[in-house]
Amino acid sequence: MKSYYRLVNYQFMWILKPLILVYVGTIISPLFLLNAAMQDYNNIHSRFEDVFASSGCVMAFAIYFAATCGLCIASIYAGYWKSKSIYTLLALPIKREVIYFSELTVFFICFIGLIASQLVGIFLGYALFTPTLVRTINGETYYLRMQNGLFLSLIRSSFFRILLPLGIESFVSSLTTLIATVSTLYYSVLCERSRRYFGFIPVIAVIIFIIYTITQRINMSNANTYINSLILLLCSAFFTWHGVKLVKRSAIA
């Protein structure tokens, strides 16, 4: 276990500084975007989740998500640049599974941190800008803060429910989607490094299915998401099994 913790620490520290910048941007971007959106008079009568979506906050999160993917990929390719540390890593007297799962753990930490940063941005955005929302009742204007307004926004917004699921089924769906995203991303890099380009076929298929699953949840489909979650989990298990196999064979060297 000591080797595992040391590898996780070593690999995570390489991307820590740029990752912090991504997290800071994920937190403060909604504040600026919401501030700009609230300058529009039409938005002062809207619900918080509607203003959040229309202001471009969701698009900003997609950009930071792509940046996190890029940093995770760069953390692997860094071992092939300059110092060629990948060869030293593979020569260490440790099990190859430790190398695989340490990198996979770093990926999980990066994405969990991104989701947590977005939630902080959402909470701060609600706290700072909801008091500017207007409610007109019987011709009179009120600036009162709605009781449990943030909780109601989390329930109504499909985007918020993906980041912070409030039920068992949605939690399982979000968790398996995250697992599939991380394992697919890592497996795609391993396939490229080992020149197993046929592996991109299932990778593309899983990416399409992840997008389908997220779209289904955004559209609030009545379909049973447990089936989608099971499929994603099985695909993740296959990617993990074959990824460990590639690392153990030193195919990525």
Image (tube, grey):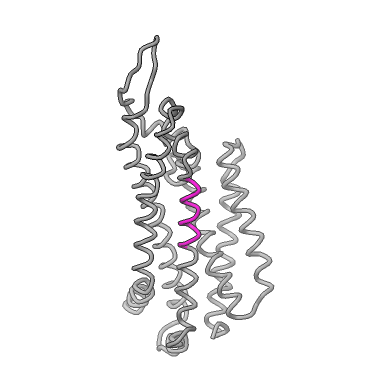
Relative to residue 228, is residue 93 depicted above or below? below
Image coords of residue 168 (percent x, y): 46, 42
> Which image quarter holds the C terminus?
bottom right
Seen at 57% across and 36% down, the residue is 220
Count of residue discs: 0
Residue 197 picture quarter: bottom right
The answer to which of 224 and 174 lies nearer the viewer is 174
- Relative to residue 127, is residue 22 drawn left or right? right
Residue at 34 percent of width and 68 percent of height: 17
Residue sticking out furthest to the top: 138
In the displayed structure, would residue 178 be above or below residue 197? above
Where on the picture, by quarter, is residue 233? bottom right
Q: Is residue 250 magenta?
A: no
| Chain part drawn in magenta | 58-68
Task: Give coordinates of residue 18: x percent, y percent.
Answer: 38, 66
- Residue 60 is inside the magenta segment: yes
Above-or-below relation of 8 to 178: below
Residue 23 lies, in percent from the top left, at 37, 57
Q: Dominant secondary structure of the magenta stretch?
A: helix
Q: Position of residue 56 (x, y in %)?
A: 48, 44
Q: Quadrant of the N terminus?
A: bottom left
Q: Nearer the viewer, residue 4 or 39?
A: 39
Instruction: Identify which residue is drawn at 36% across, 44% down.
Output: 31
**Above or below 94: residue 137:** above
